[in-house]
Amino acid sequence: MTHIYSVEHNMKHNSNFVVDVPEGYHWLIVITKTPSEFWVQGETKEYPAHSAIIYRPPQKVYYRASRDQFINDWIRFETDVPYITESPLPFGVPFSVNDPNYCRKLFELLSIEHNYNRDYKEISIDFLLKTLFNKLLESYFHGDISPQYYNLLKIRTMIQNNPGDYWTVSKMAEQLSISAGYLQSIYKKTFGVSCMDDVIANRIRLAKEYLIHSNQSIAEIASQCGYQNVEHFCRQFKHITGNTPKEFQKSQYVETF
């Protein structure tokens, strides 16, 4: 069972902010959005933005602002659930978060659930905490995260959310202020797929949804998915899926009925 005492997201503090608790009474998770200083193994060290730290009772808790402003998400709670108490994650040692926006949304949802008495409050909080710990596990075992990683993640999220936009390697590289060649190299190294193949995959993913769930023409779907030429869309769709858009649409109709 888990009992939350307090949870906050996107909390902003000034440059003299400090938390100093010689022996913590509860579990505490902190994720920073700004560079911060933590007491780790007997000394204070600065860690970059998007660092997470988990304190278990009765660990010493000490962290503070290291720049003009300190912004963080945090949750303080009691628990006896094994996925937390027996977690392989380190306690009292910061590590980088590989998807800070996802974690921010989880903290926002945890805050909402905590502050409202709803019928399934405890169940919802448990699922959200499990998801948060899953994301922290992914982050911890992700390996080293370069400073450029978060900028690449922003670009990838924009592609996934708006695949129909006009995407080019030059446009993406310009947003990151790097060369097109360097972008292609680090994007594939980071995500295992080239940036334009990622664009195409997300356009085809979106096209499938339109083909199944809308009554738009194939030309209209092609346009919404970022294709100026419907024939090019059809060729690319068949190359990726093995079917033309009409064949795919027909197969889905047959499966449904």
Image (cartoon, grey):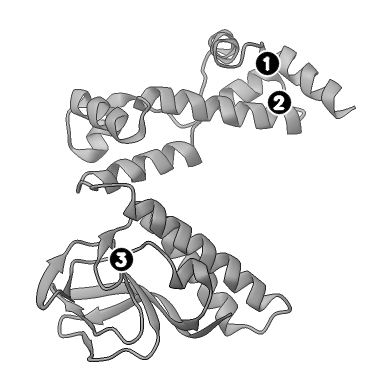
- The residue wearing badge 2 is 211
Where residue 250 appears, as percent x and y from the top left, is: 79, 17
Q: Mark 3, residues whose alpha carbon is within 10 Å: few (<14), some, or many (≥20)?
A: some
Q: Quadrant of the C terminus?
A: top right
Q: Would you say 104 lies left or right of 207 here?
A: left
Q: Are marks 2 and 1 in contact (CB under 8 Å)?
A: yes
Q: Which mark is residue 245?
A: 1
Q: Which mark is residue 118?
A: none
Q: Nearer the viewer, residue 135 or 252?
A: 135
Label 3 sits on what residue type?
A: Pro
Q: Of the residues under marks 1 and 3, which one precedes in the sequence?
A: 3
Q: Of the residues under marks 2 and 1, which one precedes in the sequence?
A: 2
The image shows residue 202, relative to residue 64, as above or below, that is: above
- The residue wearing badge 3 is 90
- Between label 1 and label 3, give the one nearer the viewer: 3
Where residue 157 appears, as percent x and y from the top left, is: 42, 43
- Kind of element beneath mark 3: loop
Q: Would you say 60 lies left or right of 211 here?
A: left
Query: Which residue does the image show at 13% across and 72% down from the upper left?
Result: 67
The image shows residue 132, relative to residue 166, as above or below, that is: below
What is the count of numbered marks? 3
Query: Which residue does the image show at 65% across and 27% down from the upper left?
Result: 208
Label 1 sits on what residue type?
A: Pro
Task: Give the distance between the C-alpha atoms of the residues marked 2 and 3, in whole angstroms.
Answer: 46 Å
Label 2 sits on what residue type?
A: Leu
Q: Quadrant of residue 41?
A: bottom left
- Kind of element beneath mark 1: helix
Q: Would you say 158 lies left or right of 245 here?
A: left
Q: Of the residues under marks 2 and 3, which one precedes in the sequence?
A: 3
Q: Mark 1, residues whose alpha carbon is within 10 Å: few (<14), some, or many (≥20)?
A: many
